[in-house]
Image (cartoon, helix red, strand yellow):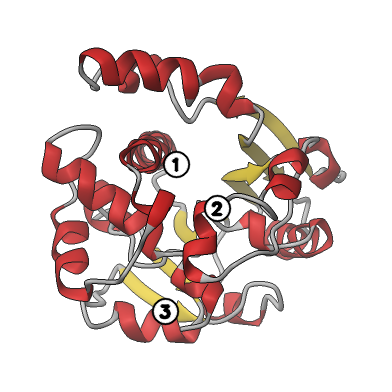
Amino acid sequence: MNHVNQTLYIPLYGKAYVSRKGILLADEKAEEIWKKTGFPLKGTAKSKWLAYYMGMRAAVFDDWLRQQMADTEDAVVIHIGCGMDSRVLRVGSSDHKWYDVDFPDVIRERKLYYQESANYRMIEGDVRDCICLKHIPETTRAIVVMEGVSMYMTTAELASLITTLNARFERIALLMDCYTVFAAKMSKYKNPIHAVGVAEVYGLDDPMLLEHADFKFKKEHSMTPQHLINQLGGLEKFIFKHLYAGKQSGKLYRLFEYRGTAHKP
């Protein structure tokens, strides 16, 4: 895998860590894969604070996706930049077609741990050229999650991907996290992704920059909601709340929800 692809091991470690502790989310698959890979993360990439953040972010995405799937039974689920994430197992796909999308090297590695089924497929490709999305059968509605992906794409690349998705589906709901512009600039000096050799990332402050006539920003979500912070104990809860959540988190990370309603002939 190249350096960008190797960033998947950072959230994988975080999910395995919180799962072993029995907080934030249950992820036996992350524990299994992390134990088998033994990838040599170091420094802040293995910080328990970052692990808590990764666990909370994943839990927020999971909860949002469960609600969207309950509200839209005929939608397909598209997880862009799936890495080794076991969201398809944590959330479940029995009533929806689910497509996990990532680079060929990642999907080849992923297939060592996951099996395709009638409702679940893994698609190889680079979403920046959008060609891989043609492997998703035509349908009217889609629910799209992009966790830990946008920071490796320019605003123009994100806009192109969104335009393609919105043109393909009559209705689309999308949730994605972003670095702020400040965080992207500061990443040159300090960022856990340096542990796997990545230095160049991008930020987005104004979610409306990705809007167009049929695709609109709906709302911003918190990646560190209080009910998840409450699962930490004692001093850790206090430290996380005051140093890593709320306004502190908002200086570095944002979580944006969008809605698209393409008007097709």
Which residue does the numbered mark 3 point to in the structure image? 106
Residue 113's disc number: none
Give me the disc on residue 72.
Answer: 1
Do callouts 2 and 1 mark residues in contact (Cβ within 8 Å)? Answer: yes
Task: Classify residue 52 as left or right of residue 57.
Answer: left
Camera-nearest label, 2 or 3? 3
The residue that appears at 60% across and 49% down in the rendered structure is 190
Mark closer to the chain start, 2 or 3: 3
Q: Amino acid at mark 2?
A: Arg
Disc 2 and disc 1: Cα gap in Å? 8 Å
Image location of residue 75, percent across then percent down = 46, 52
Which label is found at residue 141? 2
Tell me how far mark 3 sits from mark 1, CA to CA. 29 Å
Q: Nearer the viewer, residue 212 or 224?
A: 224
Q: How many marks?
A: 3
Residue 169 appears in view: no
